[in-house]
Amino acid sequence: MNAESNAAVGEWTGPFRRALGDWELTVVTDRTYTLDGGAFFGVVPKTLWHRDAPCDERNLIRCGLNSLVARRDRQTVLIETGCGDKLDDKQMRNWNVDPRRDYLERLAAAGIAPDQVDVVINTHLHYDHCGWNTLRRGDRFVAGFPRARYYVQRTEWEHARRQHERDRMSYLSPNYDPLIESGQMTLLEGDRELLPGLEVRVLPGHTPGMQAVVIHSARQTACYISDLLPTHWHLKPTWVMGFDLDPLATIDNKHRVLAQAAREDWLLVFTHDPERPWSRVERDGEGRYAWRSE
Ligand SMILES: [Zn+2]
């Protein structure tokens, strides 16, 4: 691990917990990895993003791999499953994945056993969002959450299967194909309420089938916004990741979601933030967005 980048953001561990009406929300991290600062902020010059986001001498930014557990009554929903433990040595090195692959122990320490999870939602199928979906058992792969029904958008899976040269390195099929073959993963066709008070909303841009998860209770709303707004540093609608396949769609969707989030006081949960699990947004008289201190 790079000492300087690690020191720049400190240890990112959690868990972080809060209530949202009837729901208990817990962010559990699969520790960290790094992304190139240029890829992370797209066309935004380093002179601007570097004021906020610390990077090391190789331009790498240490990022969180944050999953969200939403629990209510006897329902346990897990949104995203981190990087997992199936990466080879080269992938671990290239992405500077924290070698401590102890996510399942960290879930257990937060009181969540794999067989308690009823629903797993992947916002999309990049390797850093669905890694613990499955576990290697010899030359087979089995569900990491044996009782769960898994959900992803069909358009996302179809894109993953294309293995386009632009982004095929981001898609590792053992994370999802065994679940489709076993019938445990449902391919969704658009927005859908999965449980009362919990729905997915398709927000293309980063990938064709990326979805956010919106959770409601007692007139409060939280949104796991995924790579539409991966860290609190990406608040400006035009600060869009270089990975995005359709950055103009990302910008349009960011405008729509941020306007609603500010109007309705949503709690936004960040997928890659190494400093903050969540924040609320407000809008000033000139229409600019700012994070609200709680
Ligand atoms: Zn991501």
Image: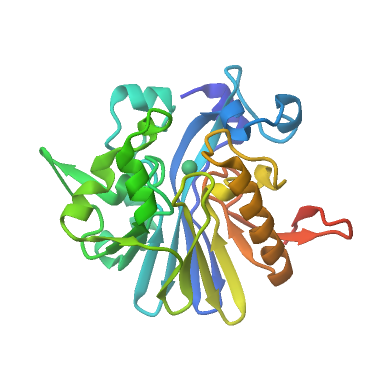
Q: Is residue 118 above or below residue 64?
A: below
Asked if residue 156 lies left or right of residue 221, the reply is left
Asked if residue 57 lies left or right of residue 208, the reply is right
Residue 254, image x and y in percent? 64, 53
Q: Is residue 81 visible?
A: no
Q: Nearer the viewer, residue 44 or 101?
A: 44
Instruction: State the image quarter where residue 185 is shown.
Output: bottom left
Instruction: State the image quarter where residue 87 is shown.
Output: top left
Q: Nearer the viewer, residue 105 or 122?
A: 122
Kindly identify the residue that appears in the image at 64 percent across and 66 percent down.
266
Asked if residue 20 lies left or right of residue 123, the reply is right
Residue 23, image x and y in percent? 49, 74
Q: Is residue 124 above or below residue 184?
A: above
Q: Is residue 76 visible?
A: yes
Q: Is residue 41 above or below residue 125?
A: above
Kindly identify the residue that appears in the image at 63 percent across and 40 percent down.
240
Kindly identify the residue that appears in the image at 59 percent across and 48 percent down.
249
Q: Nearer the viewer, residue 183 or 36?
A: 183
Residue 135, image x and y in percent? 22, 46
